[in-house]
Image: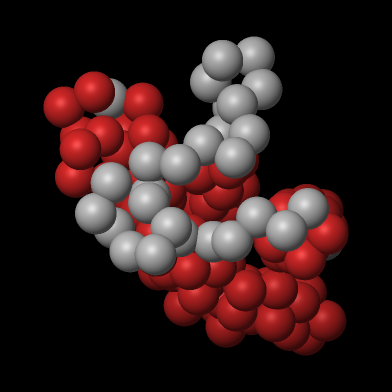
Amino acid sequence: MENAKTNETLLMIIWAQSVAAVLGSLFFSEVLGYVPCELCWVQRILMYPLVIIYGTSLIKKDVSIALPGLVLSSIGAVVSIYHYMVQKVPALQEAGGSCGAVPCNTEYVNYFGFVTIPFLAGSAFIIITVLHIFILKRRKINL
């Protein structure tokens, strides 16, 4: 019984993380007026369904239906890491300049010299991926 409660708590954290990431992306674009670049759009496409996937999984109390969320969050983490590298690695910055209408190497925010929008998205994707894997490992041990 305690295992189910812990998994439910972890699912709640994952869902809350995905909601926070979606609201954050909407805040940056709709409130602050930052136009998303092409890589930002890809990250949004991968993040937005996670709210529904993990919300449904949480309501039904069944982590097995959230497997697509693990796939999306894993891909999203890779895209976010690449996008962050385009912003921060000089050898890749030139490639990000021809990304589209808004260059992918544009840094709308840069808190503390390293926290950019792709860094925030990547952190969310990594948290979601790691917690989902943790749930799967807990299930395997207790089966």
- Which residue sits at x=83%, y=81%? 59
> In the figure, is residue 129 to the left or right of 75?
right
Q: How is the image coloured?
A: secondary structure
Task: Tell which residue pokes out farthest to the top in this image.
Answer: 112
Look at 60% across and 26% down and name the residue there.
110
Residue 22 visible in the snapshot:
yes
Left or right placement of residue 66 versus residue 6 in this view: left
Q: Residue 4 placed where, x, y %?
A: 76, 62
Report the label total: 0
In this view, 16 is above or below 114: below
For the question of whether residue 62 can be seen, the reply is no
**Looking at the image, which is closer to me, 137 or 132?**
132
Q: Position of residue 115 (x, y in %)?
A: 59, 27
In the rendered image, residue 128, in percent from the top left (x then y), is placed at 59, 52
Image height of 115 relative to 15, above or below:
above
Of the 4 image quadrants, the one containing the N terminus is bottom right
* Quadrant in which residue 44 is drawn: bottom right
Q: Nearer the viewer, residue 117 or 29?
A: 29
Specify the farthest residue to the front: 101
Work out whether residue 16 or residue 106 is closer to the camera in this orientation and state it.
106
Q: Nearer the viewer, residue 78 or 129?
A: 78
Q: Residue at x 70, y 81 (%)?
A: 52
Residue ID at (83%, 59%): 31
